[in-house]
Image: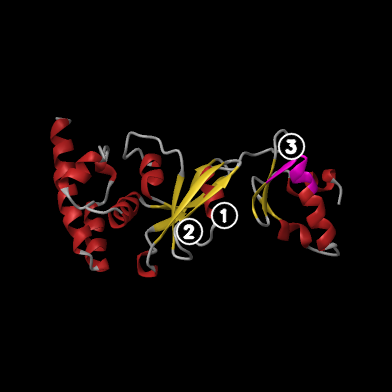
């Protein structure tokens, strides 16, 4: 395979896998050597074993960070502060893309396109996310805003306390389905989450009063 053949096959894809290139009568060993050469030459970037993106100026579409996060580790979904910032629930931007997975232990993956941190969660709690369109032509698995907040509370020590919840400087809480949050916290059977949601009601009502 020549590089122009690669561009023809994957030029319009933000991310591609080596498996995609192995269809048909392809010498896999030779293909891997070519991918290694193109990586060394700076024509493509290897995100992890078998997963790549074209380098600029060959890349037609920049992969959204949330899409990269999904593809690096599967199954996973973007959550925690990354999702809260996406929904404008917190004022700060987040340098790392933070995700939830039930597949492996917590880890960080560094790539040429950013840093990606994964937090492990028990399988019964691996829910509350959906495929969301995050750019014109890209979609990624993303926690709903309520679940992103519950994930953060679940994974952080003493996060159910009023002091911690106030420190998050939450905003735009009117978009949260608080009844769903309370119902989900009770279904998970975690008193820590239930207590936190009770205080979130107070924070939401306080925000409403401040806007009057």
**41 falls in the magenta region:** yes
Q: Circle 2: is it few (<14), some (14-19), or many (20+) Cα within 10 Å?
A: many
Labelled pair 2, 1 in contact (Cβ < 8 Å): yes
Residue 29 point in image, percent of width and height: 82, 61
**Residue for point 32% across, 38% down:** 90
Residue 203 included in the magenta stretch of the image = no
Classify residue 182 by image quadrant.
bottom left
Q: Residue 57: x percent and y percent?
A: 72, 33
The residue at 37%/67% (across/down) is 122
Q: Position of residue 151 (x, y in %)?
A: 33, 55
Which residue range is magenta in the image?
A: 37-45
**Which image quarter is the C terminus in?**
top left
Quadrant in the rendering for residue 32: bottom right
Indicate which disc, 2 or 3, sits on the residue closer to the N terminus. 3
Residue 26 vertical placement versus 172 (above, below): below
The residue that label 1 is drawn on is 72
Colouring mode (rainbow / by chain / secondary structure / one colour): secondary structure
All told, the count of numbered labels is 3
Q: Residues within 10 Å of mark 3 (few under 14, many from 20)?
A: few
Position of residue 166 measured from the top left corner of the image (x, y, whole percent) = 20, 41
Q: Are marks 3 and 1 in contact (CB under 8 Å)?
A: no
Residue bearing mark 2: 76
45 or 143, nearer to the observer: 45
Tell me, for residue 58, which label it has, or none. Answer: 3
């Amino acid at each position: 395979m020549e590089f122009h053949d690669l561009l023809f096959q994957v030029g319009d894809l933000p991310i591609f896998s080596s498996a995609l290139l192995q269809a048909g009568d392809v010498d896999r060993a030779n293909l891997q050597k070519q991918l290694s050469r193109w990586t060394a030459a700076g024509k493509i970037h290897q995100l992890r074993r078998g997963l790549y993106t074209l380098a600029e100026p060959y890349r037609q579409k920049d992969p959204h960070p949330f899409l990269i996060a999904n593809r690096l580790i599967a199954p996973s979904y973007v959550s925690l502060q990354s999702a809260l910032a996406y929904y404008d629930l917190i004022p700060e931007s987040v340098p790392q893309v933070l995700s939830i997975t039930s597949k492996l232990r917590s880890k960080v993956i560094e790539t040429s396109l950013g840093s990606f941190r994964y937090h492990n969660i028990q399988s019964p709690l691996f829910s509350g996310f959906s495929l969301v369109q995050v750019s014109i032509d890209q979609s990624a698995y993303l926690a709903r805003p309520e679940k992103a907040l519950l994930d953060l509370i679940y994974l952080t020590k003493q996060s159910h306390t009023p002091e911690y919840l106030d420190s998050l400087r939450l905003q735009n809480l009117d978009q949260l389905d608080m009844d769903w949050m309370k119902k989900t916290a009770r279904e998970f059977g975690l008193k820590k989450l239930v207590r936190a949601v009770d205080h979130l009601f107070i924070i939401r009502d306080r925000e409403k009063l401040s806007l009057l």
